[in-house]
Amino acid sequence: MKIIRIFNRGVKDGFKSIFRNFSLSLASISSAAITLIIVAIAIVFTYNVNSITKNIENVLTVIVFVDRGTSEDDINILKDKIIANENVLTSSLEYKSPDDLKEQLSANEDLKNVLNTLDENPLQATFVFKVRDVKKISETANNMKTYEHVSQVKFGESLASKLVSMLEIVRNACVITVVALIFVTIFLISNTIKITIFSRRQEISIMRLVGTSNTVIKLPFLVEGLILGIIGSIIPVLLTVFGYTFLYDYVGGDLFSQLIVLVPPNQIIYLTSLVLIIVGGLVGMFGSLNAVRRYLKI
């Protein structure tokens, strides 16, 4: 019961302190809200980047063209070399002979008529495969070009490399911004708690004289920081839930093309909201701890 009374007292004092220093509390809440909005954007963006990268990996293929006239033994040797490459997804590796390709293309009547007019099959045998890491696709393709009996290697270099690089740059910029804003928020919350401690210095002195424990004295300040952080997370949570759902519905689930598909809201908004509340509370608590340790000599 004593613990419950101490906790209830700490919560009440924490709320009172927020209203007592309302202007500074509002600044702290605003800073926390701005920080957590950026955090929300970073989380949603990162989650979608990972999803888009996986989509690219699922559809992006490397095509290795084999020299005409290559013997079956040499083709098998080339196949072993391709399999030996650690970035090649071996389960996706497929060999297509010129006859296989001709049959495949003959499904189109126009192409079938063109191919039937030719004396020889002009198509080259190919190896088609997907990669494990799309970031290394250019390195993998260049490695394939050095293999004997390989005439050329084709892959969506501009699509894969440039898109993934651009997304990573933006993601890293979001992370740096988030870290900077978190420090600003901690600083503002620390100053808010510092002023609260200063305004209550006489009360704290009396509490010390009558033998009040350090935990009881510290608790209201920690609760205040926690409340400031959680209140600051409310707007970012609402923006995440309603904003992302609106964006997803507005664009129909994909951006620019069916390759860049957004993650459905129900797979991301609830987890992101929980993370925002936890981060907000932790940032507020850390700001309070920082102030208590520096300005409350107990």
Image: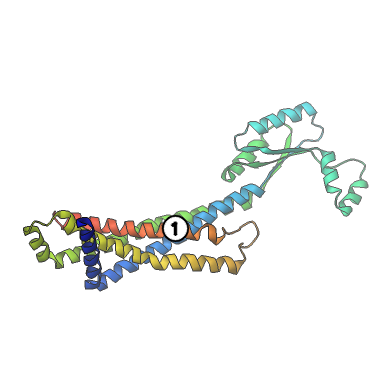
Residue sticking out furthest to the front: 1
How many numbered markers are drawn? Answer: 1
* Mark 1, secondary structure of its residue: helix
In the image: residue 14, left or right of residue 51: left
Local crowd size for mark 1, using a 10 Å CA cut-off: few (<14), some (14–19), many (≥20): many
**Residue type indicated by callout 1:** Cys
Q: Is residue 266 visible?
A: yes
State which quarter of the image contains the N terminus.
bottom left
User: Quarter-wise, where is residue 19 in the image?
Assistant: bottom left
Residue 39 in percent (x, y) is at 42, 59
Q: Is residue 141 above or below residue 173?
A: above
Residue sticking out furthest to the top: 73
Residue behind mark 1: 174
Residue 169 in percent (x, y) is at 49, 54
Q: Residue at x 92, y 46 (%)?
A: 116
Q: Is residue 106 above or below residue 91?
A: below
In the image: residue 73, left or right of residue 26: right
User: Quarter-wise, where is residue 48 in the image?
Assistant: bottom right
User: Along the line of sight, which residue is nearer the eye, 149 or 217?
Assistant: 217
In this picture the colour scheme is rainbow
Residue 278 in percent (x, y) is at 37, 57
Residue sticking out furthest to the left: 209
Q: Is residue 42 visible?
A: no
In the image: residue 252, left or right of residue 175: right
User: Along the line of sight, which residue is nearer the eye, 198 or 128?
Assistant: 198
Q: Residue at x 31, y 62 (%)?
A: 185
